[in-house]
Amino acid sequence: MLKCRLQHLFSVRLLLLHSIASLALLCLLIWPSAAMARDRVKEVVLDDGSTVKVFLFVPENSGDGPWPLCVLMSGGSGNEYVARAQFWLGRELSEHGWMIAVPVSPNNEPFTGTNGLKIPKVISSLQQESDILPGKALLVGVSTGGSSALELAAQNPDQYQGVVAVPGMIKDTSIIGEMGGLPVYLRIGEDDVFRWDDRMPALVAALEAGNAKVDARVIKGGKHIFRLDWNELEPWLNSLHNPMPADENQ
């Protein structure tokens, strides 16, 4: 009798533990899906018939939209593997009220030169979406992505709201012309493996000569890739959402 009762209690306990474990697993599966339910993938068809795959990250805690667009440029070859490796930054940026677009290079080449000409067309297509605001987009990039962002902005500064290059570099600064007061947030590590920190003063000088509003700093002890300081970046981003009146900028 006692043995049967113990076996019954043991069976009930196992069933309860199994139910709890199953519920916990279900919550783990459902929660991320619910949190990212509105994230999506869009295939942008260009004029030449080619397509650019774009991952979109929707703000979860910034109202119902529409939101301003931020294009996160991938480093390296810009392929999907590299793009996915930067999703962490895309999600962090989306938490600050931006619709984040991460384009994937269709030919495994960075979005520079002629390949970079695809980005304005991608932006124009994305801004047809009902939850994305029209107007100027923000460019953000890390490493090669930061360089792509800077180059794109130098080519057409009037199309962009600002640039965040953390880090980024323009090798040929002669491409920098009139920047029309474009805000540029530039951070480069003190121990950058490519010695971009040594070339940073020349880049900043060229940007400022073109009337860009440059916020540049060398990160002490920073390598090529470093942790972002949101205490610095967030106020800068907020200033783009709420620009100062024209008479206060003078």
Image (cartoon, rainbow, N blue to C red):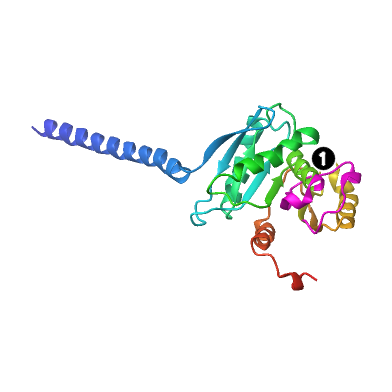
The C terminus sits in image quarter:
bottom right
For the residue pair 159 and 170, the one nearer the viewer reads as: 159
Residue 19 seen by the camera = yes
Residue drawn 71% across the image and 70% down it: 245
The residue carrying mark 1 is 193
For residue 78, what is the image quadrant?
Answer: top right
User: Is 165 covered by the magenta stretch?
Assistant: yes
For the residue pair 51 and 19, the one nearer the viewer reads as: 51
Q: In this view, does 71 lie to the left or right of 5?
A: right
For the residue pair 139 and 114, the one nearer the viewer reads as: 114
Disc 1 residue type (three-letter): Val
Magenta-colored span: 154-182
For the residue carrying disc 1, how many other residues have a C-alpha within 10 Å: few (<14), some (14-19), or many (20+)? few
Residue drawn 86% across the image and 53% down it: 178
Residue drawn 85% across the image and 48% down it: 197
Q: Position of residue 192 (x, y in %)?
A: 81, 43
Decide: is 36 above or below 211.
Answer: above
Decide: is 244 above or below 205.
Answer: below
Decide: is 74 above or below 165.
Answer: above
Residue drawn 63% across the image and 40% down it: 102
Query: Which residue is outermost to the bottom?
Result: 247
